[in-house]
């Protein structure tokens, strides 16, 4: 440390800025819930993309990776290579009737967590008995409908 006041203040400021940056980095890392996220291999999807469209094993429709009608992978995507996710709760997704099935991201949830996700199209929605279920609602609005 220097005895010159201006140099002394500059050194303190530099040390403080290093400390603040270190604390911000630590804080951001501890707040990031995805820091330990491990992604599954994408090799199965790359192979499927190279081979092109394939048939759905249920309805026979021509699709790329999955059937958006039956909610299953197509024949050239081995189902055992698709990672399955266990969710902490069951999810019912209620789609707008004008939403295009082939563009809906709801199907992705159903493919990755089939035991925990159900998809309905309004007005066909399930009845909920509050005694048996804790019911919460999230509403997403898209002005294009």
Image (cartoon, helix red, strand yellow):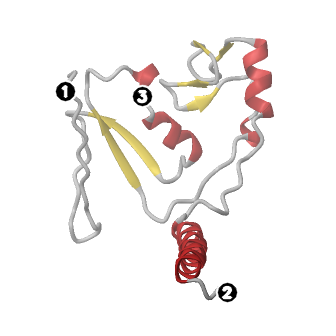
Residue 49 place in picture, x, y as percent = 73, 18
Under tag 3, what secondary structure?
Answer: loop
Q: Residue at x 43, y 22 (%)?
A: 103
Residue at horizontal 22 percent and vertical 71 percent from the top? 131
Residue 39 horizontal/vertical position (percent): 70, 48
Which picture quadrant has residue 120? Answer: top left
- Residue at numbered disc 1: 143
Between 90 and 127, the one lying in front of the other is 90
Question: Quadrant of the image for the N terminus?
Answer: bottom right
Residue plotted at (61% across, 72% down): 18
Graded by Cα atoms within 10 Å as few (under 14), some (14 to 19) or many (20 or more), the crowding at tag 3 reads few
Q: Is residue 1 above or below residue 47?
A: below
Image location of residue 136, percent across then percent down: 25, 60
Q: Nearer the viewer, residue 17 or 59?
A: 17
Q: Secondary structure at mark 1?
A: loop
Residue that numbered label 3 is attached to = 104
Q: Which residue matches tag 2?
A: 1
Q: Residue furthest front?
A: 4
Left or right for 65, reference 127: right
Quarter of the image with the C terminus in it:
top left
Q: Separation of disc 1 and disc 2 at Cα?
A: 62 Å
* Residue 67 rendering spot, x and y as whole percentages: 56, 23
Is 60 displayed left or right of 131 in the figure?
right
Q: Earlier in the sequence, mark 1 or mark 2?
A: 2
């Amino acid at each position: 440390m220097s005895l010159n006041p201006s140099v002394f203040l500059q050194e303190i400021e530099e040390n403080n800025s290093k400390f603040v940056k270190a604390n911000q980095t630590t804080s951001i890392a501890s707040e990031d819930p995805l820091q330990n996220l491990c992604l599954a291999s994408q090799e199965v999807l790359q192979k499927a993309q190279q081979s092109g469209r394939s048939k759905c094993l249920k309805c026979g429709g021509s699709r790329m990776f999955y059937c958006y009608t039956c909610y299953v992978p197509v024949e050239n995507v081995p189902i055992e290579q698709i990672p399955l996710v266990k969710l902490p709760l069951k999810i019912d997704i209620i789609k707008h009737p004008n939403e295009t099935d082939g563009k809906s991201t709801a199907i992705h949830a159903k493919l990755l967590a089939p035991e925990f996700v159900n998809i309905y199209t309004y007005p066909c929605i399930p009845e909920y008995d509050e005694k048996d279920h804790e019911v919460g609602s999230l509403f997403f609005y898209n002005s294009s409908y």
